[in-house]
Amino acid sequence: EQYEEQYEGQEQEEEQEEEGESASYHHISELTAHGIASNDTTKLAEAGYCTVESIAHATIRKLQDVKGISEGKAEKLRALAQRIIPCGFVTAAAEMQRQQDIITITTGSTALDELLQGGIETGSLTEIFGEFRTGKTQLCHTLCVTCQLPTEQGGGEGKAMYIDTEGCFRPKNLVAIANRFGVNEEQVLENVVYARAHNSESQMELLKQASALMSEDRFVLLVVDSATAHFRTDYVGRGELSERQMQLGQFLRQLQRLASEYGLAVILSNQVRLRPSSGRTG
């Protein structure tokens, strides 16, 4: 029995090591091994800082916005995170190797994949825009299925997350697409998590929840359909244009952070609108 317990313990350690090797990020809980109190890591996670990388790349001012994090504590946290996460220069050879490891997710269209040089890249933001009813949302649904495929079939072998701002998400479409690719429809539906954002503030809050989920499971795709709809309606007129652009910029910055930390492909859809003053679309 003693040998069996030792063997089981070794197996658990090996599994944890394998998980650590496969993950492209360091969970925020790792900071407790370096003297950071667990209640501080909990507060940081609740504020959307669920990885050591997010701490290393944050500004001191942003870390201080977290309740209970003083300037001195923020400086200590970031210094520690930057010792764990290399934040300096790397050779061009190392960067080339990193870029060669980037996964591309098929769009389901051979012609479109060729235009995109393989498909949708992970670790970056991709915008899909066009007029009403041109297939933007359908492409988003397709990617939610193809991202689950094996890498040799153009997938990412991970889950998808869908933030819906205009009520366009349709699970039945996922079922039809799953049947097209010959994958289990129930499994496809279970591997897509969905949330409805009712305003621009809700959109920002959902990114904190998204980070928490991504730190616990493997996600390879995040869809925001559409990205700017709420910002257009929540900030109206030229008087609020500056505030709208600032909030939208912060939203996009958070998306880029998630893409980089978790190796996600982030898809943003946007609708082309008519400019009344010029009669042109834009």
Image (cartoon, helix red, strand yellow):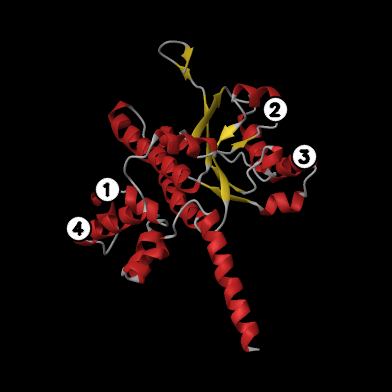
Identify the residue at horizontal 32%, vertical 71% (top origin): 37
The disc at residue 59 is 1
Which of the two labelled residues, at mark 1 and mark 3, occupies the earlier sequence position? Answer: 1
Say if 110 sits above or below 25 in the image. Answer: above
Residue type marked 1: Thr
Q: For residue 19, what is the image quadrant? A: bottom right
Query: Could you tell me which secondary element the residue under label 1 belongs to?
Result: loop
Say if 119 sits above or below 191 in the image. Answer: above
Q: In the depicted view, which residue is nearer to us: 226 or 279? A: 226
Query: Could you tell me which secondary element the residue under label 2 belongs to?
Result: loop
Q: Disc 4 versus disc 1: distance between alpha carbons?
A: 11 Å
In the image, is 232 to the left or to the right of 222?
left
Callout 1: 10 Å neighbours few (<14), some, many (20+)?
few
Q: Disc 1 versus disc 2: distance between alpha carbons?
A: 41 Å
- Image quarter where the N terminus lies is bottom right
Tag 2 residue: 109
Q: Disc 2 versus disc 4: distance between alpha carbons?
A: 51 Å
Tag 3 residue: 181
In the image, is 184 to the left or to the right of 95?
right
